[in-house]
Image: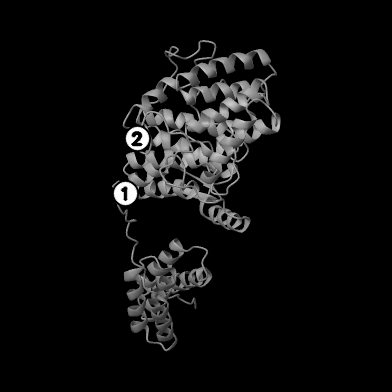
Amino acid sequence: MSRILLSWALAAALASPAHVHAQGQDQAPPAGQDSTPSSPQPPDQTQKKSKMSRLKDKFSSGCVAGIGCWGEKQKPDSEAGPQKAPESGPAPSSSPVPAGQSSSRGTQVDLSPPGGSADKPAAPSTFEMTPWDPHRAAKDLEVGDLYRKQGNYRAAISRYRDALDYKPNDAEATFRMAESLEKLGEVEDSAAYYQSYLKILPRGDSAAASHQALARLEPLLGGRPPQARSSRGEEDLQLGEFYLALTNYPAAAQRFVHALQLDPYDSMAHLRLAQALERMGRAAEAHEQYEAYLELLPRGPFAAGVRKELAKMGPVQAPPLAPPKPDMTPILEAAEHELDAGNYAAAAERARQVLAVEAENPRALFRLAQALEGMGQREQALAGYRHYLKVDPNGPYSVPALLALDRLAHDRTAATSPPSQNPR
């Protein structure tokens, strides 16, 4: 599948109120220019380990109701079944090449969710092995540089990623990718690509700039090792932002959740998911995702804007919890004591007290049927045993209930049968 270039929609998103409240400008500030006055000293190894352990506990899994889950809460592929894109809202389709996009790329946009396991990213081109093609990589690098000069960093990243698909470990494309990611506030990704450049060319022309960038980004990472987003994760982020620009917030949220299925620690996916949820009117869940971004990147390039957004939202109260149900065990035990003593009317009253609170309590249904049988109300007892077996057909009282039904049915047949006449 060809790389998805959505520069025209993303440019509209950057200029639209539907985009990031946290940015406040069309262009994200450089990753090192946070509003916090001074940078803290890098934490020691013990602090880093403690923070990573806490982050793993907090972000290793999560759910957004009606959209999806990630991490440990995500169902295995065999249980989850194929994913379906939300039907609400407009969906993009193939169209003529937008202004500013190179005509050398395909214009068919595949909007179906990526197949396969969410925790096993595919090859860089998603479904196909990309052939070695340095000439194609050079063309992608050239077009990416053009987008970068125009300030269209998302489109530039798409071309640089294509260049690295056709020519892996290209030092120039790697460094340009790092710069563009930093401009977008993608702290973890940009640091990972700066490190990759230094592994490729430790003494290259951009080595000094890479070292300076890593020193600038290290305080923002909070001690977490940088990790580059996978190709599929990048596609999900791009498509999510595209849906966000179209105000198709459910589809956008689904894409951001899918990105989190690939990497639960993707701070930008948390931020974008928060924006989509906020516009869907799900303030409590949006508040949680904004806080996730701050937890992951407390000094990130959008941290100040996110804090302003949280302050504007004010305290968000979770939906009130349903009051806990009273414990019916003592009443049931009292009913059973009354049955043992032959006080069937008292036992029936106790069982009805339980059923007034829990209408389908199997134990209470069975005890009521026993009490009715003891009181001689056989038809009501028959109905009670049948109701119990319907509610809990394989429960602990199913065999006694079946025996009681057989017994009561036999007694009813015997009572209605005419007396036999002995022949002389």
Q: Which residue is drawn at 42% across and 44% down?
A: 303
Q: In which quarter of the image is residue 77?
A: top right
Identify the disc placed on residue 24.
2
Q: How far apart are marks 2 and 1 (CA)?
A: 15 Å
Viewer-nearest residue: 280 or 184? 184
Q: Which residue is drawn at 65% across and 33% down?
A: 196
First in sequence, mark 2 or 1: give its number: 2
Q: Which residue is drawn at 35% across and 61% down?
A: 321
Q: What element carries label 1?
A: helix
Rendering coords of residue 316 (x, y %) = 32, 53
Please name the amino acid that badge 1 sits on. Answer: Ala
Q: Is mark 2 on a helix, strand or loop?
A: loop
Q: How crowded is mark 2: few (under 14 residues within 10 Å), some or many (20 or more)?
A: some
Q: Disc 2, disc 1: CB below 8 Å?
A: no
Q: In this view, does 152 lie above or below 84?
A: above
Instruction: Say left or right for 316 vs 214.
Output: left
Q: Is residue 82 above or below residue 400?
A: above
Viewer-nearest residue: 180 or 386? 180
Q: How many marks?
A: 2
Q: In which quarter of the image is residue 349?
A: bottom left
Identify the disc placed on residue 311.
1
Rendering coords of residue 323 (x, y %) = 33, 66
Q: Which residue lies furthest to the bottom in this view?
A: 341
